[in-house]
Image (spheres, grey):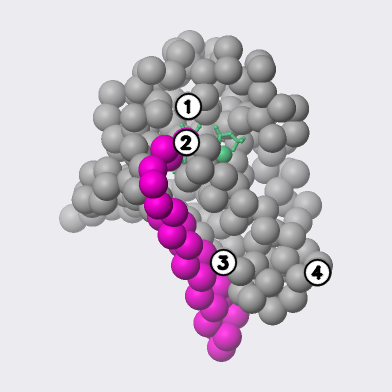
Amino acid sequence: MSKILCQTDIGDIFDLFEYCFREVMRNAVEHGAGKNLVVFGQRWEAKGVAEIVIYDDGIGVAETLYDNEYIDCNNGREALKFAILPGISGVSRDERFSQDETWGNSGFGLYVTSRFCAEYGSFRMISGDDALTFSRGVQSEHKWSLPGTFVQLRFSVQSSSGQVSRINQIIEEGKSEFSNILVDFPIQPSAASKLLASHFEKEHVF
Ligand SMILES: Nc1ncnc2c1ncn2[C@@H]1O[C@H](COP(=O)(O)OP(=O)(O)OP(=O)(O)O)[C@@H](O)[C@H]1O
Ligand SMILES: [Mg+2]
């Protein structure tokens, strides 16, 4: 599907697509615990925009984070914000120690994809009763109702092309942000909101 959406299977834009696609699909399989996974792709040729949507009918993001030892998560809306923080994973610390070095969960998949897509298009995650959207530097939160988890990644093919190195920069920024937020352990919802506020402006709903 990355090949169809990019109209090529080589180069930066293909690598970026594959990276984002793989991270979100892995999440559905590794954390969702559902029975079905549906993937949609769409490209608007004239606008130079492509979109991937991944939906799983699993347990939802909040269920995987309530028992997490690093964070103090109390509801679905907080769970979405925690899930996209760097270094936060629903997989327990003990389990992570025994995982494969390359494919083990480090808690960076959603942090990187959400920041990258927000810079070059938009990112939306809906799980249970809540939705979180980032688009062109603006963050918005909504009530929604959807069993399972839905992630929408949309980005401009032209402007994101040549931006593969941005992924590594975002990972480096995430490592330093993770050590900063871990100072107050367990991490509070307000710390998650504050970190998001440093990246995004909040949409005001009147
Ligand atoms: N589809 C999903 N269903 C349920 N929970 C999810 C889903 N996607 C993400 N999560 C939750 O959000 C957390 C953060 O996801 P993220 O991709 O950032 O990290 P990870 O998958 O744990 O590690 P990595 O992506 O670095 O391998 C997951 O560990 C999981 O708890
Ligand atoms: Mg992941």
Marks 2 and 3, Cα distance to the nearest angstrom? 25 Å
The answer to whether residue 199 is visible is no
- Label 2: how many Cα within 10 Å (few below 14, some 14–19, many 20+): some
Q: Which residues are magenta?
A: 31-55
Marks 2 and 4, Cα distance to the nearest angstrom? 30 Å
Marks 4 and 3, Cα distance to the nearest angstrom? 18 Å
Amino acid of disc 4: Ile
Question: Closer to the observer: label 2 or label 3?
Answer: 2
Determine which of the numbered discs, if any, sits on residue 31 in the image.
2
User: Magenta span has 46?
Assistant: yes
**Residue 44 placement (x, y as % from top left):** 53, 82
Amino acid of disc 1: Gly
Determine which of the numbered discs, if any, sits on residue 90 in the image.
1
The answer to whether residue 170 is visible is yes
- Label 1: how many Cα within 10 Å (few below 14, some 14–19, many 20+): many
Residue lying at the far bottom in this picture: please name it.
46
Kindly check if marks 1 and 2 are in contact, taking CB atoms under 8 A apart as contact: yes
Amino acid of disc 3: Phe
In terms of image quadrants, where is residue 177? top right
Q: Secondary structure at mark 1?
A: loop
Question: Closer to the observer: label 2 or label 4?
Answer: 2
Sequence-earlier tag: 2 or 3: 2
Question: Closer to the observer: label 3 or label 1?
Answer: 1
Q: Is 116 or 152 nearer to us in this picture? A: 152
